[in-house]
Amino acid sequence: MLVGENGADDTGARPANNAPDSLHLARQNPDGTPDYHGWPDPYGFVPASQAVFNPTGAPAEDLCVFDATNPPSNCTPAASLAQILSEYVPLRDVLASPPQPITAPLAIEAAHSSFTGIDFVPRSFARGPVQQGAALYSLEGDFGFSPANASTPAPEVGHEVKLLNFAGGWGQPPALNLQRFAYDKTFEEAFPDGIRGFNRPTNVRFGPDGCAYVADYGAVRDFGRSDPDAGFRNPADAALVQIPGTGVIWKICPQ
């Protein structure tokens, strides 16, 4: 079973920064039990205790700093925040030891790229760069809680559909070839740039006609963390609040 895992975020009871999203191949052990992929301690291939994953208390996190000059605030008073960070930096393992050897992910994507849907291509779709047995997967993109995971001119990961080709012969370890398949030319969600394109593709499925159908949640209000130029700075804006009329179903057919 091919599984996309959204990594830990800088919100919630165990906040972490920069945790990658992972692509796993889940199998049964010889005794019929499921294999183990390490959650909640390793992030990708790396132990969660590494400094790169330390929470920072940034304004969009659950551990943001309380601002007494701008009430009301759901953030943490500075003194309490200092105590919390002292207990969360570095992140401590949840488990004393893994219940079985850890199966590492096949591949990782950038933090906040957000795996949301995977489907294998039918034979009729396999042409050009798409090989037999390939899969497409959708990446919704960041949720606006943190700064974007790339800066110009590097493309931001997410808001796209990617192609996964498998290589390697029978009995050999699987080798993966990953590439962008369908994406906006700006490498960002379409709405802030006023173009027609992906905003937040949340699923991809092949229909009986052999075409790929991509469900796009649409644009969401972003309170300025992931895209300070998007212009959504109204205090009422918040992450994941959909802008009405921007959701769409995309149809992608081979030619």
Image: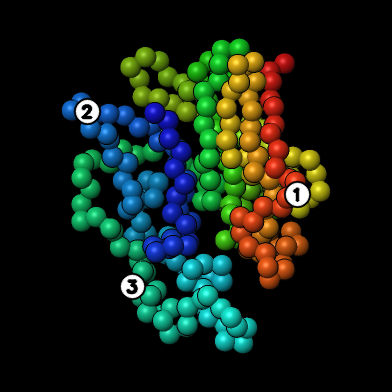
Which of marks 1 and 2 precedes in the sequence? 2
Residue underneath mark 2: 32
- Looking at numbered disc 1 in the image, what kind of residue is underneath it? Phe
The answer to whether 227 is drawn above or below residue 83 in the figure is above
Q: Give the amino acid type for the residue marked by disc 2 in the picture.
A: Gly
Asked if residue 189 lies left or right of residue 37, the reply is: right
Residue designated by label 1: 191
Q: Residue furthest right?
A: 194
Furthest-top residue in this view: 124
Which of the two marks, 2 or 3, is nearer to us in this view?
Answer: 2
Q: Position of residue 234 (x, y in %)?
A: 72, 68
Coloring scheme used: rainbow
Q: Are marks 1 and 3 in contact (CB under 8 Å)?
A: no
Q: CA distance from mark 1 to mark 3?
A: 40 Å
Which residue is under mark 3? 87
The mark closer to the camera, 1 or 3, is 1
Nearest the viewer among 83 and 155 is: 83
